[in-house]
Amino acid sequence: MSGINKVILVGHLGKDPEVRHLDGGVAVASFPLATSESYTKDGKKIEQTEWHNIVLWRSLAEVAGKYLHKGKLVYVEGKLRTRSYEDKEGNRRYVTEIVAENFTMLGRKSDFESQEATPFVTKEPTFDSFNNDENGNDDLPF
């Protein structure tokens, strides 16, 4: 076994997703996600917030740009990635990001009703996960 790199987060968007299109038209979206935990120390409730950099690609990025907004609660699954770059002064900088593979919008349905038909679960298609025969039948018992 080579290892597992799986991240699951539930948190609130810190700002609207920023969607860019790279050369060739590939969409990439990014946004900060806040997760909070609370604990009691010396009889006082302490809340600790962590900020995560979320990155989405292709159709997932387009959907995020259309339906996700600052403050919304979202479930994100993805992989942890660290990349480096050189800043203007020539210093090497490192950034850790969550490259999302899918997300689910959480909260009340009314939070999303003002928008067009809302996909509450979004995922990049993986065609190898379908097990249909040539007649369109699958192995499901229902």
Image (cartoon, grey):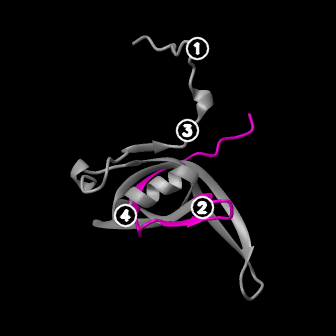
The span picked out in magenta is: 1-27
Residue named by callout 2: 97
Q: Specify the amino acid type for callout 1.
A: Asp
Residue 127 rendering spot, x and y as whole percentages: 60, 31
Kindly report the distance in space between the C-alpha atoms of the residues bearing marks 3 and 4: 23 Å
Give the residue at mark 1.
Answer: 133
Which residue is at a point 43% across and 10% down the rendered structure image?
141
Q: Which of marks 4 and 2 precedes in the sequence?
A: 4
Q: Which badge, 2 or 3, comes first in the chain's sequence?
A: 2
Q: Is residue 141 left or right of residue 139?
A: left
The residue that mark 4 highlights is 69
Q: Nearer the viewer, mark 4 or mark 1?
A: 1
Gap in angstroms between the C-alphas marked 1 and 2: 39 Å
Residue at point 46%, 14% (across, down): 140
In the rendered structure, which amino acid carries the disc numbered 3? Answer: Pro
Viewer-side label of 1, 2: 1
Quadrant location, the N terminus = top right
* Tag 2 near tag 4, CB within 8 Å: no
Q: Position of residue 73 (x, y in %)?
A: 35, 56
Asked whether disc 2 touches disc 3, contact meaning CB atoms under 8 Å apart, the reply is: no
Label 1 sits on a secondary structure element that is loop
Local crowd size for mark 2, using a 10 Å CA cut-off: few (<14), some (14–19), many (≥20) = some
Discs 3/4, front: 3
Mark 2, secondary structure of its residue: strand
Q: Secondary structure at mark 3?
A: loop
User: Is residue 7 inside the magenta stretch?
Assistant: yes
Q: Residue at x 56, y 25 (%)?
A: 130
Q: Which residue is mark 3?
A: 125
> N-terminal of the two: label 1 or label 2?
2
User: Tag 2: residue type?
Assistant: Glu
